[in-house]
Image (spheres, rainbow, N blue to C red):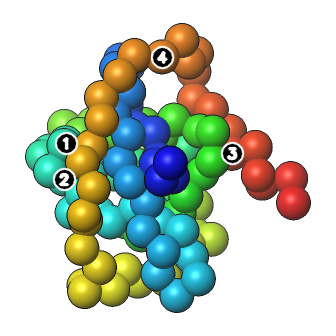
Amino acid sequence: MEDTQSFRLVGTTEIVRIPIQHVDGQAAVNWESIEKVFPEVKCVQNGGVTIPRFIKYYPDAVLDIVLSSASENDRVDSSMGDLRMSSSVALNSTLTVGQTNAPADHPIDPSSED
């Protein structure tokens, strides 16, 4: 089974799973793959912290999608800011949508305790 990253539109419970890509030893999600599902995406957050467009894989976390109409007063996680997604990486897998019992509040990356 391939690894996927879970996303939801902030304030909703519907989960979209997007396959991750492996680029230069990093597991990540292609930004264009997110835009295909959420055309008005402005940024992605984990636990209220905005993360860069090179979306690092957060196992067992649901990342929130923020649309262009949202406010700008969010924290930014710069830990992945220098990484860039290769334009040659192609999305070869289908996206899946499902429901979850995930809490409405923002999840925290359980692997951050490493």
Direction from residue 11 to residue 113 in the image, left or right: right
Question: In this view of the protein, can residue 94 be seen by the observer?
Answer: yes
- Asked which secondary structure carries label 1, the reply is loop
Judged from the image, the secondary structure of the residue bearing numbered disc 2 is helix
Please report whichever mark, 2 or 3, sits nearer to the chain's N-terminal start. Answer: 2
Residue appearing at x 47%, y 81% in the figure: 23
Q: CA distance from mark 4 to mark 3?
A: 17 Å
Give the x, y percent position of residue 90.
Answer: 24, 73
Label 3 environment density (alpha carbons within 10 Å; few <14, some 14–19, many ≥20): some
Q: Which residue is mark 4?
A: 100
Give the number of the disc on residue 35.
2
Q: Which residue is the site of mark 1? A: 38
- Estimate the spatial distance between the alpha carbons at disc 1 and disc 2, rounded to whole Å: 5 Å
* Residue 59 numbered tag: none
**Side (left or right) of 79 relative to 41:** right
Q: Is the residue under label 4 in contact with that under label 1 (CB below 8 Å)? A: no
42 with respect to 112 (left or right) = left
Q: Amino acid at mark 2?
A: Glu
Residue 33 spot, x, y in % from top left: 24, 57
Q: How many marks?
A: 4
- Tell me if I can see residue 47 in this picture: no
Judged by depth in the image, the label closer to the viewer, 1 or 4, is 4
The circle on residue 109 is 3
Disc on the earlier residue, 1 or 4: 1
Amino acid of disc 1? Phe
Q: Residue furthest top?
A: 101
Cβ–Cβ under 8 Å for marks 1 and 2: yes
User: Circle 3 — which element?
Assistant: loop
Residue at the image position 69 percent from the left and 45 percent from the top: 109
Whole-Å distance between the Cαs marked 1 and 4?
18 Å
x 41%, y 83%: residue: 84
**Mark 4 or mark 2, which is nearer the start of the sequence?**
2
